[in-house]
Image (tube, grey):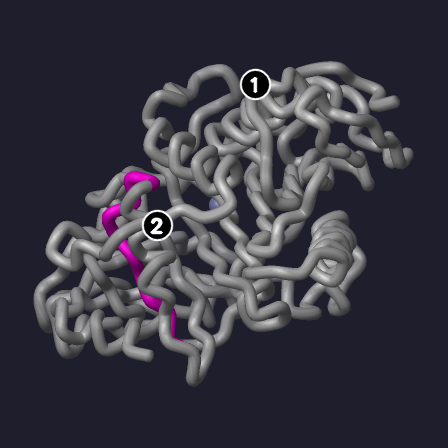
Amino acid sequence: MLPFTSDYLSYLLTHPNDSEYAKAELPGGEQIELIGVGALVITPKHLANHCKAIVLSAGIHGNETAPIEWLNQLLDDLLKGTQSTRHPLLLLFGHPNAMIAAKRELEFNLNRLFCGAWQQGNSQEHQRAAQLASWMADFYQRFDGERLHYDLHTAIRGSVHEKFAVAPFIPQRPHNVSQLAFLQHCGVHCVLFYHQSTQTFSYHSAAVHGAEAFTVELGQVKPFGHNDLSKLDALDNSIRQLITHARVDWGNVSYKDCHWYQVTEEIIRHHEDLAFNFADDLANFTEFADGALLAIQAGEPILVSDGPKAVVFPNAKVAIGQRAAILVKAMSIAQCQHLTKQ
Ligand SMILES: [Zn+2]
């Protein structure tokens, strides 16, 4: 028996330490297991040959509430039996204690503690990253099939492109064209390709488990109850199609209907005095011309080279040694096609 019948999110936020295992059968015949705080595994009654092992995570940053509410709705529909799944699902509510505190993080940025980085500390975030990674490892070991992971976020600031995905970099592995087409169906028309390893959750699933994984940014941070979830309709429809059917043909990528960016460099905060030369509320993907002054750090100017380049995720207040912004350069369609060549 599950300790809730609907609205798991309300239960989670009022019982954040209740880690007891529970299981039940859903009206659609699937088995649902509560495997820990904020973690649920749903197993279809019949596992088809072409199963995908699908991980959906939200709330790795506690105040990014729209995808958390969306995930709760999907779960509600599975609990009611109005939604079924043909594929095993691992649903992860990332950081419940930060959700309760209405904060992005408590001590550390959870989305920089994967790929084993959780071993370097003992904060709530370090412990949580270890837990999430171990549930993911168990899940992918338990179920065969194509591994997928969509880690859903919202951004602190506005963005020139409201929704965008960050594609982790795995050397020698071309980007999967069908996944890019899927993202377009989700209403994500901007993709940013990383070219170095990171310690984010989606990089972890791609690098450690060979999953097709993306960090998906879905708009701007709002408190619980203040989100217009209709803005996630395209994502909602596409993920429901993905889990309802054994196979979905997502068609071709429309290269011209998407903005493609390559991450060219990171600005690291090496010094207390790092100061950006733009407003605090600068929208993500704001473009700067070649030679523009972006910031001053330790008396040295940081200028755009080989521009124009756009700034994404600027935050001068990160801890020393952390990434304070990334610079991206628009890619041509030919460059993008090259990345997806088999
Ligand atoms: Zn986030």
Mark 1 beta carbon near ligand 1 (under 8 Å): no
**Residue 252, image x and y in percent?**
23, 56
Q: In this view, does 252 lie to the left or right of 140?
A: left
On whether residue 189 falls in the magenta region, the answer is yes
Q: Which residue is drawn at 64% across and 16% down?
A: 80
Kindly give the residue lying farthest to the right in the view shown.
Answer: 20
- Magenta stretch? 186-195
Position of residue 336 relative to residue 15, above or below, is below
Secondary structure of the residue carrying tag 2 is loop
Q: Please tell me which of labels 2 and 1 falls first in the chain.
A: 1
Image quarter for residue 238? top left
Q: In which quarter of the image is the C terminus?
A: bottom left
Kindly give the residue lying farthest to the bottom in the view shown.
Answer: 172
Return the residue at label 1.
82
Return the residue at label 2.
249
- 257 or 157, which lies in front? 257
